[in-house]
Amino acid sequence: MSIRLHILSPEGTVATETVSRVALPGVAGPFVVLKDHAPLVTALTEGEIVYGDGMEDRHLPVKGGFVEVFQNQVTVCAELK
């Protein structure tokens, strides 16, 4: 596992974990972030964030938000469903 994930909502910090992958509902379509992903900032649409190590994944439904990917760190600001 080599991605540091931070999920924030208006209510506060939802998760701060080290994971191997993060699947996100992007406005241009769903996408997956793996280690060494290119830098990215994009909006999220209603859907589900799935994160973990592939064996034990966690699912988080969201109404929308934004994500920044930079140097193996993923920061999500989203409104929870």
Image: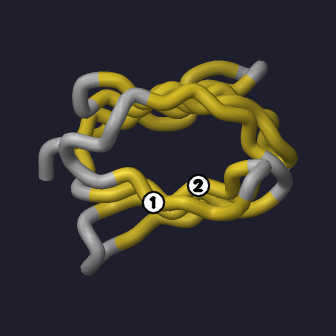
Badge 2: residue crowd in 10 Å (few <14, some 14–19, many ≥20): many
The residue positioned 34% from the left and 36% from the top of the image is: 38
Q: Secondary structure at mark 2?
A: strand
Residue 50 in percent (x, y) is at: 51, 63
The residue positioned 86% from the left and 47% from the top of the image is: 63
Residue lying furthest left? 1
> How many numbered discs?
2
Q: Using the rendered view, name the quadrant where residue 18 is placed.
A: top left
- In the picture of the structure, the residue carrying the numbered disc 1 is 32
Left or right for 78, reference 8: right
Q: Which mark is residue 24?
A: 2
Look at the image and name its color scheme: secondary structure
Left or right for 5, reference 59: left
Residue 73 in percent (x, y) is at: 31, 28
Residue lying furthest bottom? 55
The residue positioned 77% from the left and 20% from the top of the image is: 10
Residue 41 in percent (x, y) is at: 57, 26
Q: Secondary structure at mark 1?
A: strand
Q: Are marks 2 and 1 in contact (CB under 8 Å)?
A: yes
User: Which amino acid lies under the numbered mark 1 shown in the image of this protein?
Assistant: Val
Residue 14, can we see it? Answer: yes
Left or right for 74, reference 43: left
Q: Earlier in the sequence, mark 2 or mark 1?
A: 2
The correct choice, above or below, for 19 with respect to 48 in the image is: above
User: Which amino acid lies under the numbered mark 2 shown in the image of this protein?
Assistant: Leu
Name the one closer to the observer, 68 or 5. 68
Q: Disc 2 and disc 1: Cα gap in Å?
A: 6 Å
The correct choice, above or below, for 69 with respect to 12 in the image is: below
